[in-house]
Amino acid sequence: MTTHPTAPAAPARPTAPALTAPGFPEEQVRARARLGTAAVFPDPAAYGSRLFGPTAAAAGDVLDRMRIVPPVFMPERLEKLIDLAREPEFDDVDLTTRVGGFTARLPLYLSAFGSTRAGSGDLAVHASRQAARLGIPVVIGENMVPVHGYRRGGAGGGDVTRSALLARVEAYLEAAPDGVGGIVVQQSTEDADSEVWNLLYSDPAFRPLLETGRLAFELKTGQGAKPGLGGMTVVDRAEAEQLARRFTVREVFGPDAPRSLRCATPGTFTEEILRQQLRFMRNNFPKARTWVKFHPGRDIGHAARTAWAAGADAVTVDGAEGGTGWAPGVFLDQVGLPLAEALRRIGTPTGCLLATGGVWEGGRAVRALALGAGAVGLGRAALVAVDEDPEHGLERLAGALALELRLLVSALGKYTPAALAPDDLWSPPPFPDPYADPAPDPHRAPTHPQAPGPAPVHAQTSALASAQAPAPVHAPPSASAGPSAPGPTAADGPGRSA
C-alpha cells in the first residue's frame, strides 16, 4: 500500500500567524497545514446527518473553471488490472516524476521565494527542510547573494554573518533522502555581477549535490508577479544605503519615509541572447542541470521552444496568478497571461515544462499537468503552510495534495501524472468575441435583395468543395472533450490538440 507524505495533525497554533495572503485561499491552506489529508474531505462529524453536494464554487480563473472529466471506458485501467491481477485502486497511482533532470517523489517543487523578507528568513529554511523530506526539488530565488551575502565567518573563524542561501542548502542536505530531490539556484543580472553560479559550483558545500546530479542553475528572465520587471523589495534607510551600490533605490514612498524601494533590472533577452546564455551555462557548469524561467509573455510558446532547442533541462512558466514578492498593484491585477493561456500557447512540450501560479490543491495541479506541465510549483501555499506550522505544515499540505492527485488521476483511469492529457478536461463555452462581426439584425430587411437565380461561379465552386468535404462531427454540448479555448495561432506554433 502506498504511504502518503503527511504528518500527524498539528495542535492549534498558540500565536497569531505572521503572514497574510489576500486574494489567496489562505484559510484553506492553513487548514491543510494543520489537518493534512483529513482536510481533503468534509468534516466526518457531519457524516450521517448532512447531505453533501457541490458547494458554491468561487469564480476563479480560466484554469479553475475547467472541469476534470473521467471517461466511461478506461482501457488503461484494464491494462493496470491485468498487470496487478486485481482491480486497481487510487493508491496504485505512482506520483514519482522526473522534474528538470531530478527524480521527485511527487510532481511538485518548491518555487522561488527570492530575497524578500518573507521568503529569505527562517520560514524559507523550514520550507527547504520539509521539501527535502518530501523528496521534491527546491528553487532558491534571485538576489540572495547580492542582498544577504554569501560567505560565513570572519577573522578567527567567527560566524559573524548568516548566509540565507547557505542556510537553506544546509537544511535541505541534512534532510534529503538519497537519490531524490535537488537544489536549483536562480541567477539574474545582479547575481551574474556577483558571480553567484561560479561561487556555488566551486564551493565544497555543494559537492554532494554535484556528485549526485542534484544541482541545477536557473536563468531567470521574468516572473508572473511583475512580467517585464526585475525583482523589487522594500528596505529601510540603512539597508538602502548599503544596496545602492548594486541596485537602483527609489524613494517612491516619500522623501521622509523610513523605507525605500529596491529595484533589480530584468535583463535583456532576444532569441540569440537566450541561446548564448544557455550554451554558456552548459559549457561552464557541465555537472549542473540547466533551467530557465519565463514570465507569462505573449510569445511564451516561442520562448519555451527556443530554450528546449538550446538544451534546457526544464522550462518554468510563471503564470500571472503567481507571486510571493513585492510588485505594483497594476502588475498584479492587469499584466501577463493567465497560466492556462500560457500553457495553451506552449502546446505539446518538447522538453520538461514546469508551471506555477496559484497552485495549492490537487484539482488545479491536475489541470496544469493535463495541459502539459510535468510538475507544479508551490509558492505562497508553501510559505503559508510553513507559517502555520514550521515543523510539518508543508508536509501536511503536500500530503493532502498528493492524496487528491491520486484520487483524481485514478478516477481518470490513469496511473501516472505523465498519462494526463487535454482531453481529461472540459471548459465552459467561451464568452462571445467582442471583435467578431456582428450578428445580422433579423428585423432589418436586406439592403440589396436578389432574385433567385444561378449562383455565381465562386459560390458554386465553394458549394462543390463543401459537398465533397467530410461533414464535421459535432459533439453534444455536454460531451465536449478538452478545453474549448481557441487553438494556438500560427505565431505560437503547433499546440496540443484539445
Image (cartoon, rainbow, N blue to C red):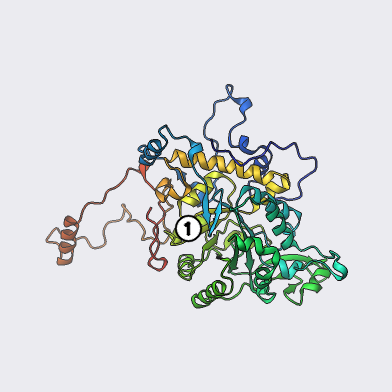
Give me the residue at 73% from left, 44% from top: 389
The quarter of the picture where residue 377 lies is bottom right
The quarter of the picture where residue 88 lies is top left
Left or right, 489 with respect to 290, comes to left
Which residue does the numbered mark 1 point to in the structure image? 343
Compare residues 480 and 397 and report the one nearer the observer. 397
**Total numbered labels:** 1
Vertical side of 254 occupied by 127: above or below: above
Question: Among all residues in the image, which is located at the extreme top?
Answer: 48
Compare residues 203 and 448 and report the one nearer the observer. 203
**Residue 254 position in % (x across, y down):** 79, 69
Q: Residues within 10 Å of mark 1 (few under 14, many from 20)?
A: many
Q: Secondary structure at mark 1?
A: helix
Q: Is residue 328 visible?
A: no
- The amino acid type, in three-letter code, at marker 1 is Leu
Give me the residue at 27% from left, 56% from top: 445
Compare residues 467 and 16 and report the one nearer the observer. 16
**Residue 62 position in % (x across, y down):** 50, 51
Give me the residue at 49% from left, 49% from top: 367
**Residue 74 position in % (x across, y down):** 37, 39
Left or right, 203 with respect to 445, comes to right
